[in-house]
Amino acid sequence: MAKTTKKEPLDPKNNSNPKVLKSWEISKQHKTILGCLLILFSVALLVAFVSFYVYGQEDQSAVLELADRTETVKNWLGKFGAFLADLIVYQGFGLASFLFVRLFFLTGIFLILGLSSRKLKNIWFWDLFAMINLSVLFGFFATSLPELGGTIGYELNLFLQDYIGKTGALLLLIFGILIYVIFKLRLSTEKVQSFFENSKKENISDTNATFAPKTDSAYNLEEFAVTEEEPETEKIPEFKPSQFEINKEALKPTINNPSEINLDPISKPLAVEKTAAVAMAVANDDFVIEASPEEEVIEENLAARLVADFGLFDPTLDLSNYKFPTLDLLKEYSTGGITINQEELEENKNKIVDTLRNYKIEIAQIKATVGPSVTLYEIVPEAGIRISKIKSLEDDIALSLSALGIRIIAPIPGKGTIGIEVPNKNPTMVSMKSVIGSTKFQEAEMELPIALGKTISNETFVVDLAKMPHLLMAGATGQGKSVGLNAVLTSLLYKKHPAEVKFVLVDPKKVELTLFNKIERHYLAKLPDVEDAIITDNAKVVNTLNSLCVEMDNRYSLLKDAMVRNIKEYNEKFKSRKLNPENGHRFLPYIVLVVDEFADLIMTAGKEVEVPIARLAQLARAIGIHLIIATQRPSVNVITGLIKANFPARIAFRVTSKIDSRTILDTQGADQLIGRGDLLYTNGNDVVRVQCAFIDTPEVEKITDFVGSQKAYATAYLLPEYTGGEENGINLDMDISERDSLFREAAEIIVNAQQGSASLLQRKLKLGYNRAGRLIDQLEAAGIVGPFEGSKARSVNILDMHALDQFFNNEENN
């Protein structure tokens, strides 16, 4: 079984490990002591302030003589009280300084009771706001009563009058009072209007109650008393009239005089509120009414209370000071604009028109759209011209233009035109800086935005990997696949925080993705027992893929417990503190698996790689695991039907044949690209031609250095440990007694031929495939043949018959 590491539960108040915060967190005892100190200090302030106003300024001369013990003061708090009163009241805010008493007292109460700090901050803000307003207002009376506004109030008032006059200062104070009333007291015109309407209704109801007859008014239960005398030993429990509603219509036919009530259960004169249960027992004509205790109602949701106290959970809190890479790390390879060669456009237009005219195809209209590397000529043929006729002239148009990579789109989807894509003689390089810095990418509201490059119309092409949900890339050697992968990774580095996305990088070439080792503890994910996060050994790929399958199953279990359908809903619920970390819930980052050369994996591992890849492609979308697979050889034995069915998003760089183009895109066109980053993108609908953005190795190195130099996590993101890789997923038969009767003969055939294959045993022993396969498994368990190696034959570990006899003798002796 896989080893599981027990994680420390997160503290819902600070969203982090309690053991880490234990060293600096303020204990409850310290908060209680500090709260008591603040309460006593508020009482001391109150005593000092009141005595200041009682004795006036008699202590003013002694304020500066604190060190002289012979000096006496009348302040009830002594010299210290006289000093505080002079500092805060006389030289401070005047009468408004009494709000300090309230603030320190409430702060002490909040610390002792452990109440919300957000509410306390709100109280401090509005009380200080009111204090300044009151102090400035009392400053108008500074000449007669200087103690009212204090020095600060007088100076602020004088300052305002110097600039806006007395009237302006008064209007500004009124505006401040309005702000306080509206935002703090939450007074609105609707509340004032409803207050007057309610007062009006109460006056009308009082008038009606005065003049209305008693039979039409609401019945009071005190008016109806049971006529029979109650024994003194038994008392009827009191009940509140507000618990019942009298059905007056049901009572009218039964009331003959004010002292009788018909309690026939059929008439149901009393309607019980939903919050109380009332039971009536009849015994000796006595009616006992018992009210069961009400259940305690939690008025506020726990999750809402946590959000109110601590805010939404922030997954970036551990790396809160993380800075995203800056644009100046990228290089600008051109002026940013496209150079339009008018002569070239005119020449190409004339050649296209002449070529079509030679085949009696007239053109009604033609226009050109100039892109970075390709120009699109849109033509509208005359009525009656068949589109297939123009499509068949693709090679003739290419010959007349003397250009490589003519591609005809007949018709252009969404337009009534036919497109002819012609490469520019002087193509413009699309820099990664111009793509990343574009408004379309910077303002993209996507989960995993990827800036691939620019279209023919020179617009930045941005797609969402989360909606693809998986991407298949193919192209011949040197056509831009590795640059395309770097563009994808760079886009995510510029847009997503390390807490939001993790990469699993598989690089059989061992040189393409090694630069990303520097950001291992920021963005990469790996197995617990692996040293390097970037996988270069094909033997370890199988374990990693199976580990991702385990991670996928674990995440689906979390989604099931949280009762959500995808990772976005799950993370939103976790951020809202509706999921308890103690139950195993955690914030789930997106995981992007990047495989640089898939064909090499298929050749060496075969089904062991294809099965987990297909399983991840089918199921992993909802839980945030996305695959990007690149290959040089888009043949059917590499990109099988099982894989193609689960990769709707595909990118095709230039390939060598129409067959390869149909394999990757299900249509031709990739064989007519011009190379150097020219690509076709499809997501199951239209095919879009894009010039991939170019990012060089030094640029990637600058970005990874910038990210790697910042504070990182303790380790890379650890995937679940996977066991079973040694047996390749097969439960081998290790019991000698259960071996096949032909085991020894099969071993002799394998050793003589030095070739471990099931087909050899089928031919030599005339067996069926299943029995031959079981024999091969038993031979592998015994150590005679090696493990499965894809299309290669298994290695034979015993060299000759003498060594085989020695092997069996050792088994018999043991």
Image (tube, helix red, strand yellow):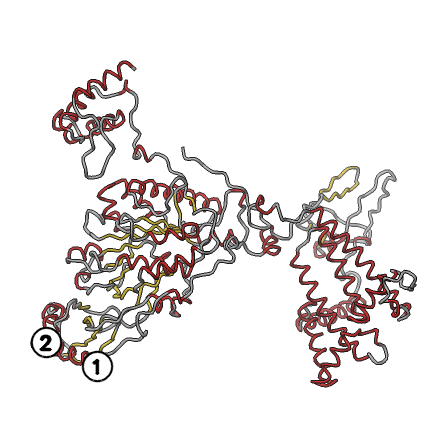
Tag 1 secondary structure = helix
Q: Is residue 292 left or right of residue 369?
A: right
Residue found 84% across the figure and 81% down from its top? 143
Residue 527 lies in what quarter of the image? top left
> Measured from the top left, where is residue 110 in percent x and y?
71, 54
Q: Image quadrant for the N terminus?
A: top left
Residue 367 lies in what quarter of the image? bottom left
Q: Is residue 745 left or right of residue 332?
A: left
Rendered image: mark on residue 342: 1
Residue 415 appears anywhere in the view: yes
Q: Is residue 673 above or below residue 272?
A: below
Q: Is residue 363 left or right of residue 74?
A: left
Comparing 571 with 338, the one in front is: 338
Residue found 32% across the figure and 35% down from its top? 725
Q: Is residue 552 left or right of residue 749?
A: right
Circle 2 is placed at which residue position? 355
